[in-house]
Structures are given as structure tokens and as C-alpha cells.
Amino acid sequence: MRKFNFCSGPAAMPEAVLKRAQAELLDWNGHGCSVMEISHRSDAFVELAESAERKLRALMNIPDDYAVLFCHGSATHQFAMIPMNLLADGKTADYLNTGIWSDKAVKESKKFGQVNEIKALVERDGVFTVTDRSEWKLSADSAYLHYCPNETIGGVELHSVPVDGRVLVADMSSCILSRPINVRDYGLIYAGAQKNIGPAGMTIVIIRKDLMGKASARTPTLFDYKVLADNGSMYNTPPTWAWYLADLVFDWIAEQGGVQAMEKHNAAKADVLYACIDSNPFYRNPIAKPFRSRMNVPFRLHDEALNDKFLQESEAAGMLALAGHRSVGGMRASIYNAMPMAGVQTLIEFMTDFAKRNG
């Protein structure tokens, strides 16, 4: 019996997608072998790749003057690739720091150029919040502003675009396809696949075409966005299995009603889970309400000596990976697109019962 998987990534995938992949594993589309075993240069795989791009463009309404890249590796690779491609010598890049992942991006980018770090996450009376935009000291003429709309570890989400009139670069690894966005607000969007798209090992990059072709001369060939775009993301052998599963996930999202339906689904799940936490003094969420994440919900027990018991009993009850990240502790429920409302309701029922028995 499948359990409800609250892992932050690699995360749960839609069961319908897994079943289809299972059915096609030995014989994909009548080719007599799996999609992992055919050439990425074959007409069949090229058709799949082009299909996946069309579907993603339709889901996100991506304009024609943006390239869509299916890249090797993780979003962490992009921490280096972005300044290599966008941060010209003598220029400065602004980085909004709202948590651990944006902090990692700051540290990596400083290896490649001048960075202006805006520390925007503050703790006040045990609650984390994001400072007002009026307090951010942005560069007068920055190459771009990098930020992370949703911090997976801390559970901090910026629900609106932070600034206008700048080249925005956004790490959407844990929120892509969870709600509609206006792609034109951004110069570059990137997202590791392993939360809302598919398995680990692939990262989606959506980049405005006029920003390409400016990579530093020291940039490795495979790190140059223009090289990847000019070669259809196939300068070398791409992550074919991840690309195939992404194509199936895009189908699944469209069948659910697209990103508009995903937004309603995700808001409903988050609302009931936060209501459970806020209404029970046994639990607390450490994030100011305007910045609470819909994807990653951290919470703490009033007596942290009960943490191990909570985790053992929740797993026995069919819920996986509720431990918070090692850097922050506590609990965390990641409730991405594939998490059904039934999973959240099961968690709420368990939390209510656990509090009664241990409060």
C-alpha cells in the first residue's frame, strides 16, 4: 500500500504518472524497449522532447521570445551558471536573501563577480518575516536581481513579484507549476524537477532570449545557455528518463485543469493544515502569516522531546518524511501538486489525535 509522502524532494509524484510509466517501462510507444534505451537523437525521442516543451509552454503561457531548456543536474548548478551567463565583468548582481537556498546562491555567485546581498529575512519574537521592500538597498544598475520565491527549508514564500523594472532571476524549484505566474515578469526562471515536475537530475530553465549569448569566456560549454538553446538542450546526452516523466506530469497537470486548478488545490490544502496548527496550542508555525509557504509547511511541537515519537507514530500511520530539515529541526510537511487532499486530512487527523494523547 502506498503511503503519503511529505518529502521535500525527491518528492511524491502523481500516482497516475507512476502507473503509466510502469506500464510503458518495457515497451514505450511500441518501440520494444524503454524510453531510457533509445537514442536521444532518434525521431521518437526528439518528438517527445518537443512535445514536453509545447506542454510546458502552454501550462505557463511562455512567450515565444523565451527559450525553454531541459538541463542536466540540479538547481544548485544554476547558482554558478547564472552569474557565468548574466554577470558581465564590472557589473553587480543583487541577491535577495530570504533563507538557506538563496543564501547558498549568494555564496556561489560571489565566486564569479560582484554581488550585493540584501538580507531580507529577520526573526522577531520567534517568528520569521521578510523586511519591507523600502528597506532593501538595491544597486542602481544591477545586472539582475536573484531571489527564491519559495524557501523549501524555512517555509517562507513571497506571494508577489518583489520588484518591477529589473531583470528578475527566480529559483522556483519548489513552487513552479503550483500557481499561475506572468513569465514576462522574469528574465530567467529555473527549477529543479524533483518537487513538482519529476525525478531528480534535471532542471528546467526558462530564459528570455536576449539575455543569452553573453556568457563569460571562461564558461564551460555545457554551462552556456545559448549553446544549450541552439542544440535543443541536447548538446550532449540529456536526462532522457527525467524528460519523459516531466512530459507525463505536464499531461497530468493539464488533465487536472492546469495551473489555475493547481493553485486552488494547493491553497485549500495549505489553508486547512495551517488552520490545524494555529488552532491547537500543541503546535506552532514559525513564519509570519503573509509569508507562509503553500508548498512547505514547517511546524514545531510544544514539547520537542516528543519529536521522535511523533515521527515514529506518523510513519506507522502511513505518512513519510515529516522531519524538518536538519538545519532547522521540528517538522515539515511538503504538500506539492501531487499531494492529495486526503493526505493532508490524514495528517491533520493524526496531529489532532497525537496532541490529545500527549498534551
Image: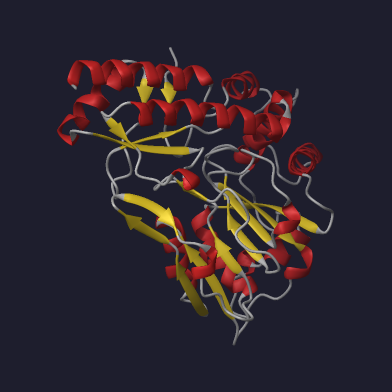
**Nearer-the-camera pick, 213 or 302:** 302
Relative to 34, residue 346 above or below = above
- Name of the residue lying farthest toward the left: 305
Q: Quadrant of the N terminus?
A: top left
- Name of the residue lying farthest toward the bottom: 90
**Nearer-the-camera pick, 323 or 117:** 117
Q: Position of residue 254 (x, y in %)?
A: 73, 29
Coloring basis for residues: secondary structure
Q: Position of residue 345 (x, y in %)?
A: 45, 18
The answer, for residue 37, to whether it is visible in the render is no
Q: Residue at x 43, y 31 (%)?
A: 274
Instruction: Give the quadrant of residue 66.
Output: bottom right
Q: Quadrant of the C terminus?
A: top left
The answer, for residue 197, to whether it is visible in the render is yes
- Name of the residue lying farthest toward the right: 64
Q: Residue at x 68, y 68 (%)?
A: 167
Relative to 353, residue 82 above or below = below
Relative to 52, residue 141 above or below = below
133 with respect to 23 (left or right): left
Instruction: Give the quadrant of residue 193.
Output: top right
Relative to 96, residue 347 above or below = above
Q: How many marks?
A: 0
Q: Position of residue 243 (x, y in %)?
A: 65, 40
Q: Residue at x 42, y 63 (%)?
A: 103
Q: Residue at x 75, y 46 (%)?
A: 41
294 with respect to 248 (left or right): left
**Nearer-the-camera pick, 27 or 11:** 11
Q: Position of residue 111 (x, y in %)?
A: 46, 76
